[in-house]
Each structure stands twice: as C-alpha cells, then as structure tokens.
Image: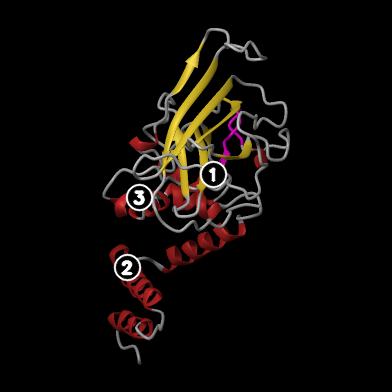
Amino acid sequence: MTIAREQDVTAAVLAVMEQTKNPRLRQIMISLVKHLHGFVRDTRLTEAEFREAAAVIAELGQRTTDTHNEVILMAGSLGVSSLVCLLNNGDNGNTETAQSLLGPFWRLNSPVTPNGGSIVRSDTPGPALFVRGKVVDPDAAPVSGAEVDVWHASPVGLYENQDPEQADMNLRGKFTTDHDGHFWFRSVMMIGYPIPTDGVVGRLLEAQGRHPYRPAHLHALIVKPGFKVLISQVYDPNDPHIDSDVQFGVTKALLGNFVRHDEPHPTGRDVGTPWYTLDHLYRMEAGEPVLPRAPIK
C-alpha cells in the first residue's frame, strides 16, 4: 500500500497484522498497533521525543543483567505488573486474591530448608522474625506437600544479590508444607527499601517527584500440582510507605500481621528483644503450575 497521508500508515500496518496466523498473537498485535498509533497521535509525539523514547527502551535492555532487571522495575513503577496480576487472578479480577508481583529479585534454586529452620545464612543483625504460614485451597482445605520458596530484603533494605556483605542465598529458603498445610521458619525482620534509582526508572521517579520506596514485605512462591503457582507478598501495614508503594503492589489481601514482642522469647534461645511473629494464610487457586521465568540468575 502506498502511503498518501498519515492516516494511511495505521491502516497499512493493521492490514499486515491481520495476516498473523496465531489468533492470540494477531489479537495482541492489532490492539498494540491501534493503541500505540493512537498514543502518537494523541500526544503529537515529536521526532526528538521519539528518538529519546527509543533510546530509553534500548537502555532498559542494556541495564538488565544477571542481578538486576530494569524492565521489570519499570513495569512495576508504571503499575503494569500489578494490573496484569489482578486481571489474571481472583476470578479474572472479580474477587480478592493472594497473588502479587513476582518482583525483580526472585532466584531459582533457593536452599531446601526444613520446617523450623533459619534462612539467615550470614551475619545479619536485626530483630528475630518467626514466620508460620498455612497454605489452603479455594475451599480452605489445607494443601500438604506444597513447595514454598521464600525470600526478602535484609534489615538494611538490600537483597543478598545486591549486597556483597551477605552470603549467597541469604534470607532465601525453600520449604514443604506438612499434612496440615503449614510451614514455618526463622528469619530477621525486614524493612522497606528504595528500589534501584541509578537507571531509567530512577530518572522517571525524579522527573515526577516520586519517592522510590517499597514497604517492608515477605515474598513467597508456592507450587503444587493442580494449582496455579501462587506468587505472593505479605506487607507490614505499619510501614510508613504502605499507602504509597512505588510499585503499586499493596492490596488489602496482602496486609500481614507482623506482631512485635517486647518480652523474652519463651524458648530462651538466642533471641533478643524485640522480636516479631507473622502468621499468614495463603490461598491457592486451581490451575496449571507453570513457573515464571526468573528475572535474575
């Protein structure tokens, strides 16, 4: 098709997209072209702005490495990750869900740890945290034999892959639920932290006058045949940034009850005061257990 005017461009591209054999890919590409071309027209995008946008997209890829994923960080900062999650879970967005963002720091092959064990693998000062979780199905029946992968940031606000002072796989562990659906472990109380701001995402936040903080949270990825993989985060409602998460990930269903204790721990074992407990219920949804691609190695 010979282009005679700007309106012809969209018609020509859509005609090509219509030839896509895969029906789902055809649907996605047609919608993408319509919205992308509409965005260009709506904003009257200039040539200089287009070149800058192309450079930004290239930089997102260039800054994504084995230990950092700038693309996922940007998706979260624009609310895309949260939106995709909520649209695809909880009866397609109609009900509350325990699903949440995977985040940019999940790693494969966390150390297998027995229930009651500790995921503190190097000197990590901070108040002790005792977590007890229960995994249930949609009817609230316990899910036994589920694999539960947990990870969280340290009390200085860094994941171990960001911090040379921490041992490899510190504050990461993989558990198996017992016959009652329970798993439990010891760790240290996490804090909220700023996301990396030395790249494209940081420049966007600065331009918008936004803070870079995520509220304190515990990650879990739960796998059991017959269920959709549950990717969840449990947030501390007392965190000062609980209502302004830079990644838009906090929902009511994900608020936990991190209880502070100022009395001595009943076991008397190397637990100073204060110490914390978290008891949390994880509800899985029926589906196929497809693991996500790990954002970092």
Q: Main secondary structure of the magenta part?
A: loop
Mark 1 or 3, which is nearer the eye? Answer: 1
In front: 228, or 56? 228
Residue 86's disc is: 3
Mark 3 or 2, which is nearer the eye? Answer: 3
Amino acid type, label 2: His
Q: Where 285 falls versus 159 (above or below)?
A: below
Contact between marks 3 and 2 (CB within 8 A): the answer is no
Cα separation between marks 1 and 3: 26 Å
In front: 89, or 225? 225
In front: 287, or 200? 287
Q: Residues within 10 Å of mark 1 (few under 14, many from 20)?
A: some
Residue 296's disc is: none
Instruction: Based on the picture, tell me whether residue 214 belongs to the magenta stretch.
Output: no
In screen coordinates, is 74 left or right of 44?
right
Q: Where 10 falls versus 194 (above or below)?
A: below
Q: Which residue is mark 2?
A: 35
Amino acid type, label 3: Leu
Say which element carries label 2. helix
Cα separation between marks 3 and 2: 21 Å
Q: Residues within 10 Å of mark 2 (few under 14, many from 20)?
A: few
Q: Which residue is mark 1?
A: 145
Report the span colored magenta: 149-158
Image location (x, y in percent) of residue 71: 52, 55
Say which element carries label 3. helix
Image quadrant in which you'd find residue 167 = top right
The quadrant the N terminus occupies is bottom left
Q: Where 126 falls versus 227 (above or below)?
A: above
Residue sitting at x 40%, y 74%: 25
Mark toward the start of the polypeptide (1 vs 3): 3
Residue sitting at x 62%, y 48%: 107
